[in-house]
Image: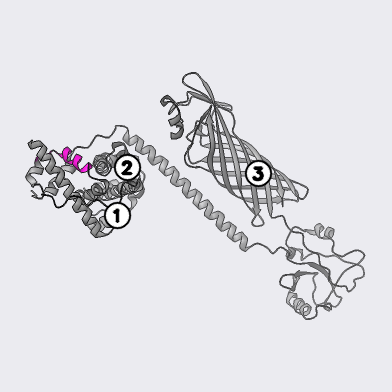
Amino acid sequence: MSNNWTDIVRQSALETQDPVLPADDFAQLEKAWGAHRRRKLAAWIGCTSAGAFAVMAAVAVIMWPKADVGGVMVAQNAEDSIIPEPVVLVEDADAGEMMAKTPSDGQAFIRNVFAEEQTAAPQDFVILQDEEKPLITEQAVEKTDDEVAPDKLENVQITYPEPQLMDIVTVKPKRKARFALSASGSISNSIVRNSAPQVVLAPAVVKLSRNFAAESSPQQENKPVSYAHMPLPFEFGLNLSWDAMDNLQLATGLQYTLLISNCGMPDMSFEQQRVHYLGIPLTASYIHHFGRYFSMYAGGGCLVEKCIYANRGNQRLYEKGLQFAISASAGAQVDIGRHFGLFAEPQFRYYLTKSEFTTRRSTSPFCVGINLGLRLKI
Amino acid sequence: MQYQEQELAHRCAKGDRQARKELYTLYSARLYGLCLRYCTDAEKARDLLHDSFIKVYDKIGCFQYRGDGSLYSWMARLTIGICVDEIRRHSKLNLVDIDDGPDIADEPSAEIVREIPGHKIRELIDTLPPVRRTVFNLHYIDGLPHKEIAAILGIQERSSTSMAAKARNSLALMIKELIDRQDE
C-alpha cells in the first residue's frame, strides 16, 4: 500500500463510480460513426475528383495544340519526281519550317530541299496555285476534313490539267472550338416507389439555428414536420466546358437548386419550406462525334453544394456543412450552326451527405433527372 | 486476454458492428470517467467519448498489442489527446499559469486522504483551474511523464513540472481545508 497521498488521490479518482451512460448511447455513437464515414467518403471522393481534374487539366495544358499550326499547301509531283505519292506541305509558322507530309520516305528530302531554297520550288514536286481560282480554298479544305489536324490531310489530291509552278499558298486551318458555355435547366426526382409529386409522413426534425431560436419561442425549436408534400426540384446551371483533348471534355460552373416542401405541422398548420442550394459541379466526359452536327457523350463527376438560403414560412432555417454528391450522365448534342448546340442529358446522382431538411432528397439519396440546355461554342 | 484484445481489434478493423459494440461495452465506462476528469460537464464529456470512439474505430487498424491492457492504454491515449485538444480549442487552457498559487502547503498524510470519499476527491480535483486540473490529471492520475505532457500541451518540460507542483499544492490546501471543516 502506497504512503504517498497523491497515490491515494489517484486510486480514489480512478475507482470512483462514474455516471452511467444512457442506454441508447451506443446507438447514437453508431449514428455519429455512420455520419463520420459518409463525410470521410465524401471528402475522399472530392479530393480524388479534384486531383483527377487537376491532373487532366495539367495534361490538357501540356498537350494544348498551338493556336496556329501553320498553312497547308498542296503540291503535285513533278513528272520525274522520285516521290510517288501526292504531297501536302504543312508550314509550321511558329517554328518557321516546312513539313512535307507524304506516306513515303521522301519527307526529309523534301524538307531539306525546301529549307535550302525557300524561293524556288523543289524539283521533285511543284506547288500549285491558280490566282483566279485559289487552289486551296476554305471550301476545298472543308470538303476533305477541315476539323482535323493538318497532318491528316496527307491524302488530299487535287489535280489540275496543266500544273504550273506557283508561289506558296498558305491556308490557315480553322481554329477548333475549345470552350463552350452552356445554360441548362433540369428537373430531377428521387428514386422512390411513389410517383411525383410526393407526400411523405416525415418524422424528420428541422433544427432551427441558434440565432433564430433566440428570437423565437422555445416551443418552436426542433419543430417536427408531420408530413410533407414535395414538388419536383428545379435546377439551373451555368457551365463552362473545355475540350481538353479531342474526345475529352472537362466542365465546371455554378448550379442553383430550389427544393420546395409543403410541410404540414403537428398543429394542423401548413407552411411552405424553400431551400436554395448553390453548387459547383466538376465533370469529365468522353465525347464521340457522329458527323458534323451530332455528338454523344458520357461522363461522371461530383457536385458540392451549400445551402445559401432556407426558410419555412417566416422562419429562417440553416444547414451546416456542405452537401456532396457523385453523378453519372450521358447526353446527346445537336449543333445548330457553328456556334450553338442543343443538348439533352439524363443524369443520375447519388448524395453522399444527408440534408438536415425535409426535402425530396431526404427521402432517397439517389436521384435521376434530365438536363436540357443550350451550349454556346467559343 | 491477448487473443481477446487482438481479435477484438481485428474484428473492429474489419468493420464488424458486433465487435464495435463489444469494444464499447468493455471500455466506454472507463473512458467516460476519463473524459469527465478532463471535462467536468457530463454532456460535453459524452460528446468527447463519442469523438474518441470514432477516432478509435478509425485508427484501430494501427493498434499493436503490447501486453495485457494495451488496448485500453492505446484508447486512453487517444481519448486524452481529444480531451486536451477540446480544452485547448475552447481556450480554457491558458497555458500561462499567471497565478503563482500557494507556497508549499503542508501535505496531507496518506491516512487522512484515504478517509475522504472518492467522489469528494473528484470534486476537489474538478475545482482546480483548468490548466492545473489538466496537468494534474495527466501527471498524477494518468501517469504521463512531464516530457510527454510538455509534448501534448506544447509547453516546456519545466513548465509542466511547475504546473503539476502548483496543482499538487492547491489540492493539498483544499484537502486540508476540507479536513478542517470536517473537524469543526
Residue drawn at x 28%, y 46% is B8
In the foreground, A45 or B166: B166
x then y, percent, for residue A348: 57, 40
In the foreground, A159 or A275: A275
Where disc 2 sits, the SS reads: helix
Which mark is drawn over residue A88? Answer: none
**Placement of A256 over or under A75, stated as above or below:** above
* Residue at which label 1 appears: B152
Where disc 3 sits, the SS reads: strand
Amino acid type at mark 1 = Ile
Q: Is residue B117 magenta?
A: yes
Mark 1 chain? B
Of all residues, the one furthest to the bottom in this rendering is A116
* Residue at which label 3 appears: A331
Residue drawn at x 78%, y 65% is A155
Q: Is residue B69 visible?
A: no
Give the side of residue A231 with respect to residue A352, left or right: right
* Residue at which label 2 appears: B48
Dominant SS type (magenta)? helix
Amino acid type at mark 2 = Leu
Q: Is residue A218 visible?
A: yes
Residue drawn at x 64%, y 56% is A244
Toward which corner of the image does residue A29 lie, by quadrant? top left
x then y, percent, for residue A303: 55, 44
Mark 3 chain? A
x then y, percent, for residue B40: 26, 40
Q: Is residue A236 magenta?
A: no
Report the span colored magenta: B115-128
Separation of marks 3 and 2 at Cα, in angstroms? 48 Å
